[in-house]
Image (cartoon, rainbow, N blue to C red):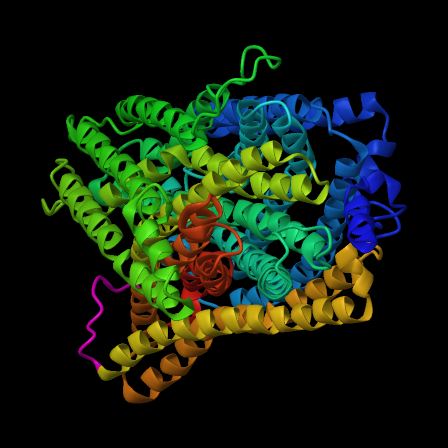
Amino acid sequence: MMMDEDVEQASLMSFSDRPRAFPNMRSKTYSPLIFRILRKLNVRVVSIILLLCFGVIFYMGASTSPIILFVFTVCIFSFLLSIYLTKWVLAKDEGPPEMVQISDAIRDGAEGFFRTQYSTISKMAILLAFVILCIYLFRNLTPQQEAAGLGRAMSAYITVAAFLLGALCSGIAGYVGMWVSVRANVRVSSAARRSAREALQIAVRAGGFSALVVVGMAVIGIAILYSTFYVWLGVDSPGAMSVNDLPLLLVGYGFGASFVALFAQLGGGIYTKGADVGADLVGKVEQGIPEDDPRNPAVIADLVGDNVGDCAARGADLFESIAAEIISAMILGGTMAKKCKIEDPSGFILFPLVVHSFDLVISSVGILSIKGTRDASVKSPVEDPMAVLQKGYSLTIILAVLTFGASTRWLLYTEQAPSAWFSFALCGLVGIITAYAFVWISKYYTDYKHEPVRTLALASSTGHGTNIIAGVSLGLESTALPVLVISVAIISAYWLGNTSGLVDENGIPTGGLFGTAVATMGMLSTAAYVLTMDMFGPIADNAGGIVEMSQQPESVREITDLLDAVGNTTKATTKGFAIGSAALASFLLFSAYMDEVSAFASVSFKEVDIAIPEVFVGGLLGSMLIFLFSAWACAAVGRTAQEVVNEVRRQFIERPGIMEYKEKPDYSRCVAIVASAALREMIKPGALAIASPIVVGLVFRILGYYTGQPLLGAKVVASMLMFATVSGILMALFLNTAGGAWDNAKKYIETGALGGKGSEAHKAAVTGDTVGDPFKDTAGPSIHVLIKMLATITLVMAPVFL
């Protein structure tokens, strides 16, 4: 009896009474080199440097096009708004000392891993840049580049510079996502002690800051690159390059962004899910302690993983999606303008940049529309956070329709086909409806308010096996509706583009592919708000962990649990949105690849015949790549989780006082294990993804040379790209939805359904959630990046396959 009283008294101790409960993961906090340099500079010097930079940017914009000037202005205003959102979030209180201690430990672990991970990625990027330089110094040039006097050396340096800039911007996008999340989590936890609506508003505005910076950087990075090349190469002056061919020089930027995003997603995904699975298997299943319990040695590693896996990696992922879509649409716009002999093609080429500039404006309105309670002292009834986010999304969608229509009239009106702009506006509407449909379908299959997840939860009541069977079948079924939506969207947009009235010199309609490009832009025209909803998820998850670890009252945990469940749904809907946009963007990139091969080979390359054995084999290899990549990504999580499980078990055995709060777990040991494992394990699947298309292209190019088939290498790579895209879309949909549904089935049971926490149904649901973790947060999101990276790498390496 006396022992029970001691345990109870110990459990009530506050963390501030336990000295060094959460030791720093590093002896001193880390900040990037550029920030350390800026802090040492005089404020006036920094102001003058910034003014000079803005002056140069606006001069180049004015020398290029008024459209570029508009894009620069909107991006800079969005950056200013993001600074306001940051100050607003950071002005909120961090809560009691025990919350701050936990938050500091999470921040140190996240920043330490980020520094090491991106140091590794940057070394690989520099090595790859050197390989690209060597290849481009010995490759062929297009007739247009030769006519413009663009030599091999110049072409090589331009591609490498674009690649490194894309990689740098993608890295910054990831850092921004992580930077805000590790500072907002504790503020959301503190706000949850007062009201759910205030906590929701802080999480949304923190996510909004990251989203505006990510989308703004993707847009302004491409705009700066475009205007720099335009001015430097004297585009459209006599004897110089035509503006229609300029977008081809930007492909390196998309490849750089994809390269960093792939390794960020792999490394972050392995980290977060290795820690999560290990913590759950020993903590929940074996020891029977709650999620995020401070007695679990892996809990800090798990919370760090939310930031490096979900925030940093997703920021890089969305950045890469937008960059790839903009560049492919610019290439197709330039190609169509050349075929139709449009006098001023700049509107068709720069249209994607304007669409995403308006995205920044309308998403800002959506983010700011989510208000806190008028009087924080009045406890308002807890409302459904998903309904609040949905209202903001609906407002953003309405504004997107209006601004998209205005953009098409402004930029896509041409005397040759006066009604073409309206056809393209309808293509954009198809894309916007597709985005909304994807968000709704993902919500239906992953939100526990709907039947699929409740059926999955019910299957848990009959055991672990039936839970797994129900989850797999749900994931497989969830691929059907999205594929039908994508199919209708592509065919509708292609048909609307073809009937726009734009024809080539032979009278053949040429607007079909550009119509699908416009639909993709429509789908991504609310990308900043969708990314905000995505960032909301891990911030809410972290806030729940901090509340649990600092042993706040149950009423506070109920608020963070509600936000966390909604966060799981928003993360799943964002993944659905990301794979839908990846499908459309990959179709565009595939078309851009065929255009580029035509330009380099000086022969028409419009079809790929899969009846040719070598081409069919290329398709098989593409499909195999997706399955092998997914297997290696999931296996990496499994191996990392095994290391965590062994370490957590060891600590519970060697330190029996942990369970009674008499001994402190060694959190830093689990953080170190997961960090080193994630960095080691991300290399193998990443190398497979990069090397496969290059090796296949070169092998079949050599084979084609000896068998008298000059374009065999390019055809086989095209087939590989097509099949990998199709297989990747289906695999990613299955993995994302099954994982999200398993997670929310567990959350549904934890609300008290089917016996609640600790019941047999809950234990079976935890097993399902554990299986789903690498599905939805490692392999699934990595495939989004993989299928776009395959497309961008083939664009960059196309001359090598000829």
Depth check: give the residue in front, 679 or 686.
679
Q: What span is colored magenta in the figure?
A: 601-612
Q: Is residue 774 left or right of residue 711?
A: right
Of helix, strand and loop, which mostly describes the magenta segment?
loop
Q: Quarter-wise, where is residue 593 in the image?
A: bottom left
At 50% from the left and 60% from the top, the residue drawn is 766
Residue 602 is one of the magenta-drawn residues = yes
Q: Position of residue 632 (x, y in %)?
A: 50, 73
- For the image, the number of numbered tags is 0
- Residue 4 vertical position relative to residue 444 in the rendered view, above or below: below
Q: Quarter-wise, where is residue 385 in the image?
A: top left
Q: Is residue 221 visible?
A: no
Depth check: give the residue in front, 409 or 362.
362
At 55% from the left and 36% from the top, the residue drawn is 558
Q: Position of residue 266 (x, y in %)?
A: 56, 61
Q: Position of residue 329 (x, y in %)?
A: 35, 44
Depth check: give the residue in front, 508 or 269.
269
At 43% from the left and 75% from the top, the residue drawn is 628
Depth check: give the residue in front, 600 or 24.
24
